[in-house]
Amino acid sequence: MAYILRFRKLCFLEPVKYSSCDKAKADEKKSVETPKVENEDQGAVSAVLEENTKRKKQKKQPKEWRCIDSCCWILGYMCTTWWLLLFLFHFLPGNLPGLKVPEPPGARLKREGLTALHPVVLVPGIVTGGLELWEGKPCYEDLFRRRLWGGSFTEIFKRPMCWLEHLSLDNETGLDPPGIRVRAVPGLVAADYFAPGYFVWAILIENLARIGYEGKNMYMAAYDWRLSFQNTEIRDQTLSRLKSKIELMYVTNGNKKVVVVPHSMGVIYFLHFLKWVESPPPMGGGGGPGWCGKHIKAIMNIGPAFLGVPKTISNILSAESKDVAFIRAMAPGLLDSDFLGLQTLEHVMRVSRTWDSIVSLIPKGGETIWGNLDWSPEEGHVCDSAKKTQHQQHLDNNRKNENNSKGGTSFRVQELTKYGRMISFGKAASDLPSSQLPVFGSEEFVRGNSSSNSNSSCGDVWTEYNEMTQESIKKIAENKAYTVRTLLDLLRFIAPKMMKRAEAHFSHGIADDLDDPKYNHYKYWSNPLETKLPDAPDMEIYCLYGVGIPTERSYVYKLSASGRCKTIPLQIDSSADGSDNGCLKGGVYFADGDESVPVLSAGFMCAKGWKGKTRFNPSGIATYIREYMHKPPISLLEGRGLESGAHVDIMGNVALIEDILRVAAGASGAELGSDRIYSDIRKMSEKINIRL
Amino acid sequence: MLKRRKGSAAKKSPNSEPQLDENKEKKNNQLQEKSNSNAANLKGNVNFNSKSNSDERLRRKWSCVDNCCWFVGCICSMWWFLLFLYNAMPASFPQYVTEAITGPMPDPPGVKLAKEGLTAKHPVVFVPGIVTGGLELWEGHSCAEGLFRKRLWGGTFGEVYKRPLCWVEHMSLDNETGLDPPGIKIRPVSGLVAADYFAPGYFVWAVLIANLARIGYEEKNMYMAAYDWRISFQNTEVRDQTLSRIKSNIELMVATSGGKKVVVVPHSMGVLYFLHFMKWVEAPAPMGGGGGSNWCADHIKAVMNIGGPFLGVPKVVSGLFSAEARDIAVARAIAPGVLDIDVFGFQTLQHVMRMTRSWDSTMSMLPKGGDTVWGGLDWSPEEGHECSVKKPRNNNMQTARPNGTGNSANATRVKYGRMLAFGKDVAELHSSEIERVDFKGAIKGKNLANTTCRDVWTEYHDMGIGGVKAVADYKIYTASSILDLLHFVAPKMMKRGDAHFSYGIADDLDDKKYEHYKYWSNPLETKLPMAPDMEIFSMYGVGIPTERAYVYKFGPAAECYIPFQIDTAAEGGDDCPCLKGGVYSVDGDETVPVLSAGFMCAKGWRGNTRFNPSGMRTYIREYNHASPATLLEGRGTQSGAHVDIMGNFALIEDIIRVAAGATGEDLGGDQVHSDIFKWSERIKLQL
């Protein structure tokens, strides 16, 4: 009897629970109704109790229909409609009469008569390339040749620790840890889609195919983007493979030179390749001088990170970029505390610090390029577009004032964002004139006794912060403001192992004398300021990038509250907001760019560093800047936009695709219309004093 | 999962409508009665009333549709629950269950050999065979929109069911050139994914790849030489530069692995393709790859042919002649309605035939070597083969009779040489008793085709009744006359094929004409490259009845059908167990007879022959077929079937050992279960 009663009670409450769960997501109207229903049902329960004995038999049948059955009923209803819709969807004609899909540029250009001419090599950037497992620990035994990176990422949720372990590299060598082999996915599938439905190269590939490209004259130079560039050759012979592929395509396509399309970090990877291929063997590929001139028609860099990306710094320092910092502020419990028993950020930091390639993206060129405490090439940039014109005049006055009175009118100078201070502790420190800042030499950083800090209760999460004392961390914060130069010292102090590993592979300076034999070493090859371009006067270099999106440029940091466990001691001060020109938001100063790479980094080499015959470009390779003004998608139907300028979404930008197709079909930069500039890149470049 | 959830969220509103309605009514009732009476006292009552009202309404509402929905819902939730359990299941669970039932499984060969200390040494090149390689769409007609870079061949074959005519149209090649039809570009999938799995769960190379990876192989020292298996070998170079690509990749792998030569593992038709490649790569530039006469010696350590149809496959004859292999023939007999009649408004077999006849590559596998190899009217190398597995094998059969001086006493002797015979009696009669009328002169009658046949084109429509009859009057076709027959029946196809393939035996290999590429894939018309250190392995399964010769009859006399079909009623009975369902079978791996797979290594290339001037060593490795003991084993670890052999542990072990540096002698030389040496001896071929 009691059992029956309980069962009934359960029956009655079940649908209510169900609906109230739903209500959380549903609109308010429904939620107004719920309490009533609940009352009523609870009343009903009591009624049942009263009437139980009398009407037991009659009521039993319908009552039982109401509970689990109705759940089943609803599920069934949903499933059937879903299937029906799916079925209908599959029978949908490809082009609905109402929906007009804009014609892809490839189809239009084909009608113009463009056909495949030059073979195309695609070089993907960091993160976008897929990685698959070739040998793993027992926890991943069944995932042989499955993607660990890219694709659906389901494995993260299933076995997160195992996943992290497999994606990490060895902390000492920067190569595979013993017993684990994770390799880049080869072929066009490596980076056509990053995740299902999230295209990277797919649209470009499709449009190239429309004018006649196919597997034989298109090659995706997939590489393991976690490794340093030279290590991809040492471990996988990726550079040799690329060389052999380019030579093969050159020969089999009737001695037509290739057009190379690198994206993001792929740009500096290919820069590395250009030097590697002409250098003599053991270190290089032995192609001899003239290899590039013979085989390459044009390099069309998309969103090039020539001079580095400021985002990298916040990534290395505290494993956060704008998006993560925002989450951290909104839900401090979510990322900071041990979420599901894991210290998410710490783990991410530990893994990403084993990836050498990230170091290649640290801003290059030091204070000459990125500005110092008081100066930066971008100063005067207005982030709020509404104020822009008005501010421009204001700014000119400002400049004059400054020149006249030499800092006497300090309140006005403050309006210029000091982008040069890449990291400052506290918002105030980012505004103050440099004379008021305390300055420490980097030598003053002292490593404390590491043993005192290791706390066994914190799990086995290793970050190098654990080896630092509280005092030294304080010391870091006292220094208030860091420029690019001092930042490198800071990084060497904070992440000594990573920087030691990576600095054997990358360099971030500016060469005084490019003919110095030391620049024959591979560590300089990916830095455009420390290498000469190959001798290939007929080659063309394009810088294609989006503008019009606020891009992270420098950061306001704070010390994070020291928690129970040693968490990362630094974090972006997301409460720092607002300045006169709207460039500071959530602890981040923004400049113009494509959301990841600032204009300065993407455009400087093409605008000035390589323009004409310079010491970096001895043979006078022609350079072109093609900027694409960002326009967010108008409707949802457009997906990620046909005119987007964002770092990855630009790969679907119609204008950019058209440019690439035209060049691949034989056009030269002049035929495209040479430079097309929306940003202030010319002005910024002029401000940079670099010997050319 | 995610999709479903999204869908359910979207449909929440219509679903909750009935509930809402109900609630509203209840509320109305409640409100009415509340106004009349004291709410506190009567609440229970009121509720009860409303409840019973709604119950009645409910009962009426629960109609058949609701029951259906309920049922579907139950199944769905059960399904999701099981799916959830499945996903939460530890990965080693299936293996655990298997081992609990069948006892501990042997280590996969890769693990075993890794324990022995073998490591990756020589780079490995895989050459997939016909049919197993994936093909994807690069340019198509409007009906295939949205399929850009999706697989049309391999994978799930979903498109076959959705848009069958569109699919057939895209998979066909141009009838004149043997290349792409205008506006369509189908290209091979590249990389290891091209042929690791043919369909989901149906492995081809995947097991071998996984085992090689255990001893340290990875993408950089394994290469899948995927090619478009529909077009003729030389055309893969002309259209896609596939041969150049293979050459460049092999050179790259040899260079990056420190000068270690490659081990090539071709399968099925890939064997012929690689034979073609070896000649191509050393031939001078315009026609060949210009690698020079030492290229093979410098770059190849061993060629490990798996199930190689060196001398062709009889199955192809029936495939080209009437678009049926044994499996289809049985289906045709059992359910004549399914395949013959216009299912869904299309003529399946005719379409298949039209499509396959546009593929040049099938012609590379027509039986080669003519009567010398495959036997004449009264003689064949395999005669005396016992088909019945039940009878104990008596290997001391009578020796081969010279030139078949008719002995009708021995009726059980299957005349395999008669590859096509019209009628069972004809297949068994002695040659002198058969009247044959030459068909070559027969005039093709009026066009059979007529508008009612829709647009299905097969060349039979051009033959006319006279032609069809003439073909049947010739009664018996041997390997060489089959070529004449095909020339007569399918002139366009054979014209294309003759430009790319040859089926004869060379008298003088130094003749200039043999420098042409059409001879390169025929081992009887080419010399092996000068590479004395190279080794050639012939690895194939034995112990499965394999199609060797056919009994044919007229098809239904309707206008639109293929006029010939296999006579599935022809059964050998106890006298002749080799004949079953119109097909004479012989020992082999289900597709390739032993003779074709083994002859070259057993005799043609053994020692210093004219086909093998540098005397490179050849080894035969046969694997006796054992069907999987339980269902849990899947397709078996000791299978000898043509494709399933790729999962055979013994074969994989052999390949891994060679890839890790062993020679044929280290493996134990020849390993023979069949009568291949005896049969080879009977073939009189000048060496």
Image (spheres, rainbow, N blue to C red):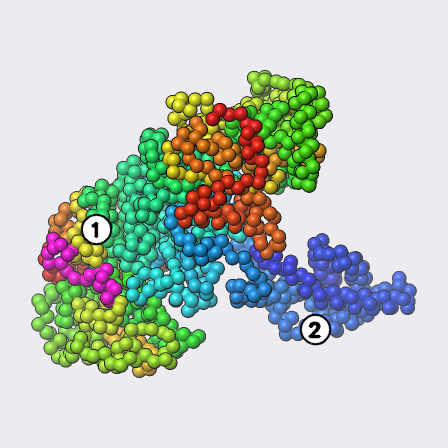
**Percent x, y of residue A81:** 61, 66
> Which is the main secondary structure of the residues drawn in magenta?
loop
- In the image, what residue occupies the spot 67% across and 21% down? A404
Q: Decide whether residue B331 is among the magenta residues.
A: no
As drawn, A606 above or below B401: above
Q: Nearer the viewer, residue B535 or B43?
A: B535
Where, quadrant-wise, is the N terminus of chain B in this rendering? Answer: bottom right
Residue A70 visible in the current orientation: yes
> On the picture, is A465 further left or further right than B175?
right
Secondary element type, mark 1:
helix
> On the picture, is B417 further left or further right than A129?
left
What crowding class fits label 1: few (fewer than 14 Cα within 10 Å), some (14-19), or many (20 or more)?
many
From the image, tell me which residue sits under label 2: B61
Name the amino acid, label 1: Lys
- In the image, what residue occupies the spot 19% across and 70% down? B484
Where, quadrant-wise, is the C terminus of chain B in this rendering? Answer: bottom left
From the image, tell me which residue sits under label 1: B279
Tally of numbered discs: 2
> On the picture, is B169 further left or further right than B662?
right
Distance Cα–Cα, label 2 vs label 1: 78 Å
Magenta-highlighted residues: B494-514
Q: Nearer the viewer, residue B653 or A422?
A: A422
